[in-house]
Amino acid sequence: MATNWQMKEVSKSCTMCGKEFSDGQQYHSLLEISHNDLLCTNATRNDYCIHCWKELPEQKAGKTEEPLDSYSWKGVFRTKEKKDSSNFKRGRLETMLAYMKDNIGNPDRKVSNLLFALAVILERKKILVPCESSAYNPTMLVYKHSKSDDTFILKTPENIDEDKEFINISIQELSASADEV
């Protein structure tokens, strides 16, 4: 069964060579999870510059490790803008994003489908950006926050038509709660 995770944000430097990423630089991320780690408590994420990513297969060749599931995607490094907390107003989209963060590991199919619907809304508003994910696991979708680089790994929707009413009501409730803030 697939699981949703909230992963740490992209590193500030390449795991292999240690050079800091510059604003706008492409990078590759590699998530490795042990086959025995069903709860993904020891998942490791490493970020690589393009040069080191090309050399990675040579670096790993011949090393005997426990079997791992690997997921990879690429992104563009963005430097973070400093937030002025006095001007920050929590609106509907931020409420949806906060709900996603709070419920990312929920195993309930309805909640997983709701998270997918929220991700699509946030993608259309250019808050979340889909990442090119690994072909090894087509049941996972990888999204990255456009400003903070937080990474969200979601399950692809299952029987989403059955959950339309739950999704619509939940989105209405999230919107109403944001209007009250």
Image (spheres, rainbow, N blue to C red):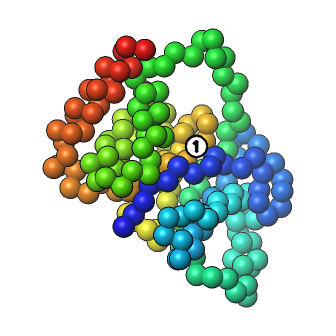
In this view of the protein, can residue 147 be seen by the observer?
A: yes
> Is 25 situated left or right of 91 in this image?
right
149 shown above or below 136: above
* Residue at x 22% of width, y 34% of height: 168
Q: Indicate the position of residue 130 as horizontal and vertical percent values.
A: 47, 47
* Residue at x 63% of width, y 46% of height: 9
Q: Residues within 10 Å of mark 1 (few under 14, many from 20)?
A: some
44 shown above or below 115: below
Quadrant assignment, res 125: top left
In terms of depth relative to the viewer, which is nearer, 46 or 123?
A: 46
Q: Which residue is mark 1?
A: 150
Quadrant assignment, res 177: top left
In this view of the protein, can residue 126 be seen by the observer?
A: no
* Residue at x 66% of width, y 17% of height: 84
In terms of depth relative to the viewer, which is nearer, 162 or 77?
A: 162
Quarter occupied by the C terminus: top left
> Is 167 situated left or right of 63 in this image?
left
> Is 179 situated left or right of 45 in this image?
left
In terms of depth relative to the viewer, which is nearer, 125 or 173?
A: 173
* Residue at x 36% of width, y 44% of height: 115
7 shown above or below 3: above
Q: Kindly identify the amino acid type of the residue bearing the numbered disc 1.
A: Asp
Q: Indicate the position of residue 5 as horizontal and vertical percent values.
A: 49, 53
Q: Indicate the position of residue 136 as horizontal and vertical percent values.
A: 46, 71
> Is 41 situated left or right of 54 in this image?
left
Q: How many marks?
A: 1
Q: Indicate the position of residue 24 as horizontal and vertical percent values.
A: 69, 41
Secondary structure found at label 1: loop
